[in-house]
Amino acid sequence: MIERVHERKDQHLMAINLTAYDNEQVDYEDPNFRIKIWTISHPPQANIQYGPWHYHEEVEWITVLKGMMIIETTQQTYTLQAGDVVMLGSNELHRSHKYGQSPLIYIVCHADMSAFMDPSLLSYLAAFTGRSANLTGLNDTLRKYPLCIQQIHELLHEMLRDMTDKGRGYELAVNASLKRLLYLLIQIDDEQMIEPMEHQLAQKLRPALAYIEGQLDSPCQISDISSKLNYNSSYFAKLFKKGMGMTFTSYVQMRRMKRAEQLLLTETWSVTEISGRVGFTSPAQFYHLFRRHFGCTPRQFIEQRNTHKM
């Protein structure tokens, strides 16, 4: 079990401007399979220094194999020992350090939840991507369920093994383990933080999302789609944000960036051509949004991925 959890009272840490801290860019081995899991080891020596404050879009799980460590968010501090699990929601500002003089070994898993929310899981998209809930808050509930902690610990072990061995079909195994992990979180969610989208709302938005996917290579205005679905534009904008946890424009930009990522890695087109293929009339605007989303230029993105393949 997590040995100690307490709320932080430092008022100067309560109001956080994320731009002042490190927005960590997760480097996926396979950019089309957006999950990264690995082991970190620290030698047997005392270390009272925290690492830098940082955050990332990905949801993160940490489970300790040996030794003790401290993870700090702006709200709470978690002291973890072997077998413990902690979860950090999307864009949760945090830092950590090794505790004590014993060796420390732990597993870290980063997952881009939007990449794993297929259409059948549409109703959970906003919750698991952190747009309607802060999943870090589930740690307090998790402490009440030791068996669930053990199961998550074992699932992270399995995912690490499958990602390391890369046997035939390992992507399916990892995907299944991740979905199993999410299901466990729903089962222990006593506070109902993971609130699925209402069924009727999901039914209303499915045609809109299908339309967006078909329009990523051309202008896609909210007035056009609301008209096709016989909605008032203002009403549809509120409906969309309620269901998806983000504005229509933000969602379209996110999907354009996902498509651009795929094209950059699978096609030989120029960056300018790809910018047009994902609906941008201005290559400069495409460069700006791409850099904001991925933390690098499109050409740097290609170079980094090609380097990892060598």
Image (cartoon, rainbow, N blue to C red):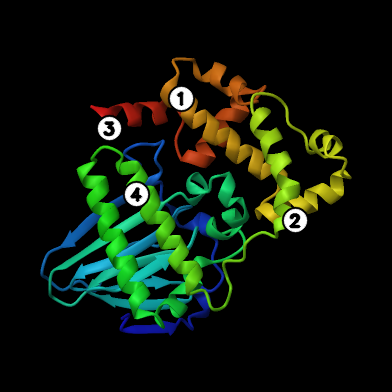
Mark positioned earlier in the residue sequence (2 or 1): 2
Mark positioned earlier in the residue sequence (2 or 4): 4
Question: To which residue does mark 1 refer?
Answer: 264
Quadrant of residue 214 in the image?
top right
Secondary element at image label 2: helix
Front disc: 4 or 1: 4
Q: State left or right for residue 31 relative to residue 67.
A: right
Question: Quadrant of the image for the N terminus?
Answer: bottom left
**Residue at the image position 52 percent from the left and 54 percent from the top:** 19
Quadrant of residue 289 in the image?
top right
Q: Work out whether residue 143 can be spotted.
A: yes
Q: Residues within 10 Å of mark 4 (few under 14, many from 20)?
A: many
Q: Is residue 18 above or below residue 299?
A: below
> Which of the numbered marks, if any, corresponds to residue 174?
4
Question: To which residue does mark 2 refer?
Answer: 200
Question: To which residue does mark 3 refer?
Answer: 308
Q: How many angstroms separate mark 4 from mark 1 (CA)?
A: 25 Å
Contact between marks 2 and 3 (CB within 8 A): the answer is no
Q: Residues within 10 Å of mark 1 (few under 14, many from 20)?
A: some
